[in-house]
Image: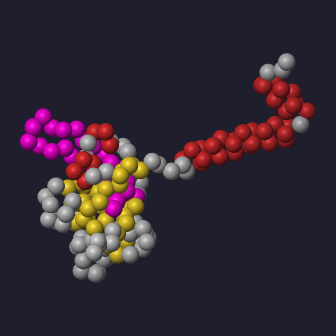
């Protein structure tokens, strides 16, 4: 029985072009498996706002609802490879408890319009999954990867969390 390297070598000696075809097929197969593995949907866990920020949710994709608001200063950075800006998610519009969120900046759905180019007069302009504009008065559901920072040694400090938002959906008010 021939081993694979011998088989490929003998075959390559007979027809060098076929050896390259096999390498190309192997490469395409590996690329195809990679694309298939990376395109699978992430499992999204719905979370209550009060319990979302916990160690068990670190690096998980979760869904949580609240009101998005802009901080006094908006910080934008492209350290992750794409430009993201910070907003705050509040349980209610006036609740002091927050989850920090990072939203992609751009012009498409689920994107924050560049604050420097936004002439609307709103604190921020964000488009949801359907392309509708979202304001701080709108209740929204956000989906993204939660990051948890360990509790500090001070028992009075609350844990810190932030989310990298992928999806923003405006929730219609209940009658």
Given residues 112 and 145, the one toward you in this image is 145
Q: Main secondary structure of the magenta part?
A: strand
* Residue extending farthest top: 1
Residue 57 in sight in this render: yes
Q: Is residue 23 above or below residue 85?
A: above
* Residue extending farthest front: 175
151 part of magenta stretch: yes
Q: How many marks?
A: 0
Residue 128 position, x and y percent, is 38, 69
Q: Name the residue: 22% across, 51% down.
A: 50
User: Which residues are the magenta region?
Assistant: 141-166
Q: Is residue 5 above or below residue 17?
A: above
Location of the C terminus by quadrant is bottom left
Q: Name the residue: 26% across, 65% down.
A: 68
**Which quarter of the picture shows residue 73?**
bottom left
In the picture provided, is 158 more to the left or to the right than 100?
left
Residue 61 position, x and y percent, is 39, 49
163 part of magenta stretch: yes
Q: Is residue 116 above or below residue 148?
A: below
**Which quarter of the picture shows residue 167?**
bottom left
Residue 137 position, x and y percent, is 23, 72
**Which quarter of the picture shows residue 95?**
bottom left
In the picture provided, is 96 more to the left or to the right than 62?
left
């Amino acid at each position: 029985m021939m081993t694979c390297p011998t088989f490929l070598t003998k075959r390559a000696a007979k027809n060098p072009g076929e050896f390259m075809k096999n390498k190309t097929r192997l490469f395409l197969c590996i690329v195809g498996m990679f694309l298939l593995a990376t395109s699978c949907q992430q499992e999204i866990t719905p979370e209550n706002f009060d319990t979302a920020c916990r160690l068990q949710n670190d690096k998980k994709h979760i869904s949580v609802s609240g009101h998005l608001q802009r901080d006094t200063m908006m910080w934008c950075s492209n350290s992750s490879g794409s430009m993201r800006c910070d907003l705050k998610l509040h349980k209610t519009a006036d609740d002091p408890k927050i989850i920090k969120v990072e939203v992609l900046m751009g012009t498409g759905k689920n994107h924050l319009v560049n604050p420097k180019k936004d002439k609307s007069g709103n604190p921020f302009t964000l488009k949801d999954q359907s392309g509708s504009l979202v304001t701080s008065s709108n209740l929204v559901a956000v989906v993204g990867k939660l990051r948890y920072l360990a509790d500090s040694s001070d028992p009075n400090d609350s844990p810190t969390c932030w989310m990298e938002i992928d999806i923003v959906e405006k929730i219609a008010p209940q009658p």
